[in-house]
Image: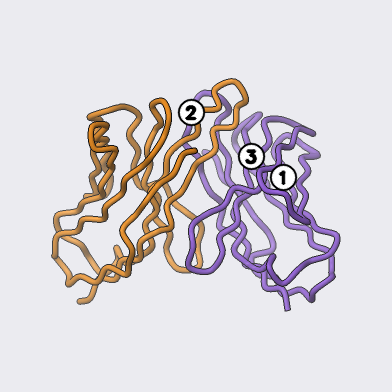
Chain colours: A purple, B orange
Amino acid sequence: SQTIHQWPATLVQPVGSPLSLECTVEGTSNPNLYWYRQAAGRGLQLLFYSVGIGQISSEVPQNLSASRPQDRQFILSSKKLLLSDSGFYLCAWSAGLATDTQYFGPGTRLTVL
Amino acid sequence: GNSVTQMEGPVTLSEEAFLTINCTYTATGYPSLFWYVQYPGEGLQLLLKATKADDKGSNKGFEATYRKETTSFHLEKGSVQVSDSAVYFCALSDQGLNTGRRALTFGSGTRLQVQP
């Protein structure tokens, strides 16, 4: 069966510090991968998606970036965090073009102080 | 562009009450529709889905019917339990068929609180 992992689970970072969040998927090959952000009390905003290694599409211009160095690894980064980057970050995967259904990881709660 | 509108919460019910959470959508084409559930501090779990008009998705006693004529996908459960307390998100799929995008557009979520 497929599983999706995210770490760290919780992170507190000062303004201006760098960020690296990691997501890995097991039990499937060539998945589509997604990063979403959920601000407090709000819905989910798609940040990035990837259909293959090294292929990243950005949905919202901001100081975040994403990379996919391996087939089942998706990384969200920032060089300098802003207060507005605080939120709950969710990684998701789907089985390529065959289905619309996305499966989510447990999330990382980021607090920028 | 695509959008999803959900009823605002919180929705507070007594155990064994009937639940309806309204969801309407705006989209081009024929999107798939989803309900996801989020328990406190956790990620989203797929609850049910429907891929075409008049389809009924169901899981764990929850049901939702894809109504194209009213562009709705309301979530229902006949008898809620305390363990159903969570935030429920309605979502639709993107139609980027040639890009593999398949992104989901989410509603803002509806918090359900079930009291014993």
Query: Label 2 sits on what residue type?
Result: Thr
Q: CA distance from mark 3 to mark 1?
A: 7 Å
Q: CA distance from mark 2 to mark 1?
A: 20 Å
Query: Label 1 sits on what residue type?
Result: Phe
Query: Label 3 sits on what residue type?
Result: Leu
Is mark 3 in CB contact (under 8 Å) with mark 1? yes
Q: What residue is pinned by disc 3?
A: A33
Instruction: Identify the element where label 2 is drawn.
Output: loop
Between disc 2 and disc 1, whose residue precedes?
Answer: 1
Q: Position of residue A8 (x, y in %)?
A: 69, 63
Q: CA distance from mark 2 to mark 3?
A: 13 Å
Q: Residues within 10 Å of mark 1 (few under 14, many from 20)?
A: many
Between disc 3 and disc 1, whose residue precedes?
Answer: 3
A24 left or right, relative to A17: left
* Disc assigned to residue A74: 1
In the image, is residue A71 above or below residue A84? above
Residue drawn at x 72%, y 43% is A73
Residue drawn at x 62%, y 34% is A32
Taking the view exactly as shown, the residue that stands out farthest to the top is B98
